[in-house]
Image (cartoon, rainbow, N blue to C red):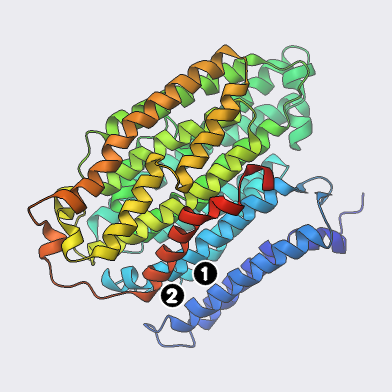
Amino acid sequence: MNLIPEIKDLLSILPAIILSAGGILFLVIQFIFHHNDHKIIRFLTGMVLIGTLWSLCTTSFINPGYGSYFKGQIRLSNLTFWLNTIYAITAFLTILASPRVLRQHDVSFPEFYPLLLFSVVGMFFMTTGSDLIVIFIGLEILSISLYIMIGMARNSISCLEATMKYFLLGAFTSGFMLMGIAFMYGASGSTLLKDALYPMFAGSEPYALYSKLGFGLFIVGVSFKVALVPFHSWTPDVYEGALTTITGYMASGPKAAAMGLMLVLFQYFPTYNYDLTWNIMLGVIAAISMTLGNVLALRQDNIKRVLAYSSISHAGYVVAGIVCGAKWTVVYYLIMYSFMNIAGFSILAFLENGKLVITYNSLKHLVKTNPFTSFALLVVFFSLGGIPPLGGFWTKLFLFQEIAKSNDPINRILLILGVINSAIAIYYYLRVTVSAFMSEDSGEVANSEPIQTSWGISVAATMSIFFIMFGWIVFYPSSL
């Protein structure tokens, strides 16, 4: 067997090569410049991500094109193209929004930007990999990068606590994934997805049982990254403890990668001899996630914790879409949801001003001192609540339409629960705008000293909000 990769194999991972080379180069460059001067590293990182977007386009439309590479271990498709685009855009917007937050929390590590590039590399291999080992390595590259990025604010106890919780639970679930890979390899003799999953549908006992057990353990690890119930307990504490722009990045790019991995995995399920057990299992998880996430969000006062539980409920909606086979609707949902998270957490980072904890009460009468920021909050939270004609409304409408097309009783139940939970969620989303626009008393933000404008946060939030408001006009699932 010829193990030397061909040119087309290397071209298939060109985005990852660019990002990896850029990250390693910047680790060297940061020793040349002053310790606290991160501008050059930040600028170069942004340029690398723009170059990566370009390479994605060339990889998809020119050469080598969609297909399998590296002996079937890498697979490019229209799905992976859109997922990789989400990763690059969310990382670019995070680079724009992060400098002020890092400076306010005395994070003087230029390594932050190379780590961001490495995390995108991890996400790239998570969803373009069609081999269990490649997927696992990509997941670990992403996870290790996030552990370090969250823990960079060493002077913040909450950040260190968030890092430890995320690291310990993440390492634990990685063990589940490795055990799952071992079972699937033992049942099939291969780590390629198409071969590793085959015994689940056509294998004889006990190989079919081993493969199903292995796949179940692997899904446990993926569910942890998605933050599905009952693997969600880390989410509110980590979202609250991490620096706000990093939280926004975690809630967009890495979350989209984990959900994209679920899409990739279930693409290998044959339409014939389909085992409804997985549909029932995922349907129950989706129902519990969307319900519990919304109910617990009602009890929160800290806006970051509200968005954490909101992300759990949104994960339930997405998994419901995966269960009914609405692939492109799910991708559209991930794109819009990523922009909503980047915009929302960027605005919160601006309002925190390095010291405040943003609650419903602290936002009271915000429109008095920050009218433009109040309008931006209104757009983001109305969109998250599914208020027309914003992007969040269309994501839920398209998703519920796809679920409604199915005659499966499971999907009918998910549709009813999805509509009910969307109505429940409107309450806590609207509380934000009620506090900002309709309260007579002034909160901490309105009474605090004037907030200096941050061009990075402003650009990242404005780009995201523009897409939330107008992107749906020309961009919808059938156009993907």
At x 27% / y 42%, what residue is drawn?
430
Instruction: State the residue at coordinates (51%, 41%).
Output: 394
- The amino acid pointed to by label 2 is Pro
In the image shown, does 90 or 124 lie closer to the viewer? 90
| Residue 114, numbered circle | 1
Q: Which residue is mark 2?
A: 110
Q: How many marks?
A: 2
Q: Is residue 258 above or below residue 156?
A: above
* Any part of residue 359 in sight: no
Proximity of marks 2 and 1: CB atoms separated by less than 8 Å: yes
The answer to which image quadrant residue 384 occupies is top left
On the picture, is 146 further left or further right than 102? right
Label 1, secondary structure: give it.
Answer: helix
Query: In the figure, residue 274 lies in which quadrant?
Result: top right
> Badge 1, how many Cα within 10 Å: few under 14, some, many 20+?
many
Q: Residue lying farthest left?
A: 441
Horizontal and vertical percent for residue 44? 55, 79
